[in-house]
Image (cartoon, rainbow, N blue to C red):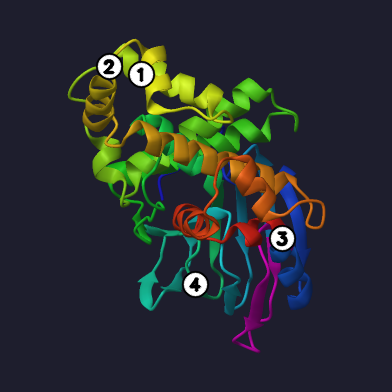
Amino acid sequence: MELHGRNAGHEDPCAMHSFERFQTRDIEEARLWGARVFCENELSSLDAHSPVDARMYYRSLGGIGIGRMSYGGEVTIIPSQFDTFYLVQMPLRGGECIDSSGEATYTSSTVGSVLNAQRPIRIRHGANTEKLILRVDRDLLERQCGQHLGRGVQRRIEFETAMPLDSLAGKRWMRTISWLIDYLDGEEPSASPLLTAQIEQMIVTMLLGCQRSNQSEAFLEEPRTITPAFVRRAELFVEEHAHEPITVGDIAAHAGVSTSSLYTGFRKYRNTSPMLLVKDIRLQRVREQLMRSEPGRTTVTAVAYQWGFCHLGHFTTDYKRWFGESPSETLAR
């Protein structure tokens, strides 16, 4: 595998010794560490002659986390459903068989994998396999993709599971990962918020550009025309006044155009309507508020009404379609 980093050719640029989280021969301890860093999981050894010798190196930065891990022997990992993140896996040696919703993917030093949020996964980790891992928060991925497209992501992002690492795009991706490890290895844990945001954007943009997904066509499409200023004025107005009872007339008046021009502009340049944008932003604000709230101190109904959702049935359907879980599940976290 082509990896470039500090002292390339003299030492492994992806050693990550300063990021060590654990090293253990106890399979239950390894499982608990996996639960702490990622999510609950079932972990079982498949070969009594190749005992578990698990280790993990890992560091998080904002909405991303980078690591290196191995289990020594052959094991099966069944994580609970990923709700809040995507996981990119890049074998350095050995390989895995990944079953995602009944579809098998075999990884190696030339084929990595992307595990999608909210998909059931079963991983058969080969003996003596070692891999790099990159965790990306789902909210970060959707936000960055939406900002790039100039509109909200219209459906949950689904990547192809198999990730070629020996293609031109795959080599660019691995050089970026190597750079990130090299950078973090020499940085203090408290990076500046501005720099963290820039690194997050770079990693997410690279992932969306290098790996095929259901957003690839829109993401890689060259903009045909420059978006008119009135569309952006309207979007900023909605962002700032989503908590108020605004109408399409209010938005048009602030943007300085007629309502028909406003509808035409949003349809042509954003593939949506002004009031759908209002609803999308309010749904996002509901989610943010539910994630900050404690069960027992508020209710889904109260938060929904606060943001103008009076028909709870329609609200719940829209929320689940957008975020992949019910509002009550978000509140219960």
Q: Nearer the viewer, mark 1 or mark 3?
A: 1
Does any portion of residue 205 appear in the rendered image?
no
- Whether label 1 touches label 3, CB < 8 Å: no
Q: In percent of the image, x 31 and y 42: which residue is there? A: 169
Residue type at mark 4 is: Pro
- Left or right: residue 21 versus residue 2 is right
Amino acid type, residue under disc 3 in the picture = Ala
Q: Residue at x 46, y 54 (%)?
A: 318
For marks 1 and 2, the one nearer the N-term is 1
Stretch of the chain drawn in magenta: 36-55
Task: Determine the image quadrant of residue 254.
Answer: top left
- How many other residues sit within 10 Å of disc 3, few (<14), some (14-19) or many (≥20)? few
> Where does label 2 land, which residue?
258
- Nearest to N terminus: mark 4 or mark 1: 4
- Name the residue nearer the viewer: 319 or 243: 243
Q: Residue furthest left?
A: 224
Q: Nearer the viewer, residue 245 or 86?
A: 245
Q: Quadrant of the C terminus?
A: bottom right
- Looking at the rendered structure, which numbered label has been put on residue 332? 3
Between discs 4 and 2, the one toward the N terminus: 4
Marks 1 and 2 sit apart, C-alpha to C-alpha, by 6 Å
Above or below: residue 72 compared with residue 60: below
- Residue at numbered disc 4: 120
Q: Amino acid type of disc 2?
A: Ser
Image location of residue 14, percent across then percent down: 57, 45
Which residue does the numbered mark 1 point to in the structure image? Answer: 252
- Mark-to-mark CA distance, 4 and 1: 44 Å
The secondary element bearing badge 1 is classed as helix
